[in-house]
Image (cartoon, helix red, strand yellow):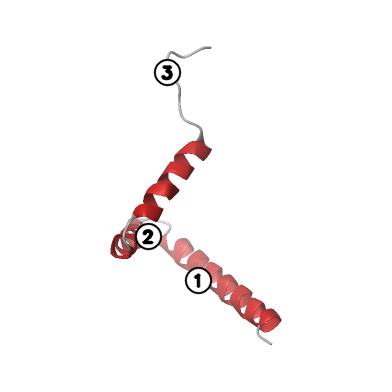
Amino acid sequence: MELPIRFPMDEDVIAEEAARFRELTPESKLRTIRGMIDTGEFLMRISRRREFMREYNGEQEGQFRTAVQEFIARHAR
């Protein structure tokens, strides 16, 4: 079915958002990131699955920490 309107491709939307973010000042970038973190924390607090989300977040942080440590061990000689 042909629709009379054209929806943008996801790739185009992501590229536009990335370009907009790159143009922000460092202060605005930090404010934007802090806002996303605050929103995520709020959603975790009000979620019925908050315990699962807290555990999952901890697991992801642990995996990240391990990956960084392995990277440093490989490249810091």
Query: How far from the left and from the top, in percent, is residue 52?
Result: 48, 62
How crowded pointer 3 is (Cα within 10 Å; few <14, some 14-19, many 20+) is rated as: few
The numbered mark, 1 or 3, whose residue comes first in the sequence reads 3
| Residue on which disc 3 sits | 5
Residue wearing tag 1: 58
Disc 2 secondary structure class: helix
Side (left or right) of 7 relative to 30: right
Residue 3 vertical placement versus 64 (above, below): above
Callouts 1 and 3 close, C-beta under 8 Å: no
Q: For numbered disc 1, what is the local secondary structure? A: helix
Q: Rounded to the nearest whole Å, what is the CA distance between mark 3 and mark 2?
A: 36 Å
Note whether 35 is above or below 59 in the view shown. above
Tell which circle, 2 or 1, labels the residue nearer the N-terminal end: 2
| Rendered location of residue 24, percent (x, y) | 33, 56
CA distance separating discs 1 and 3 = 43 Å
62 sits to left or right of 13: right
In the image, 53 versus 75, the foreground residue is: 75
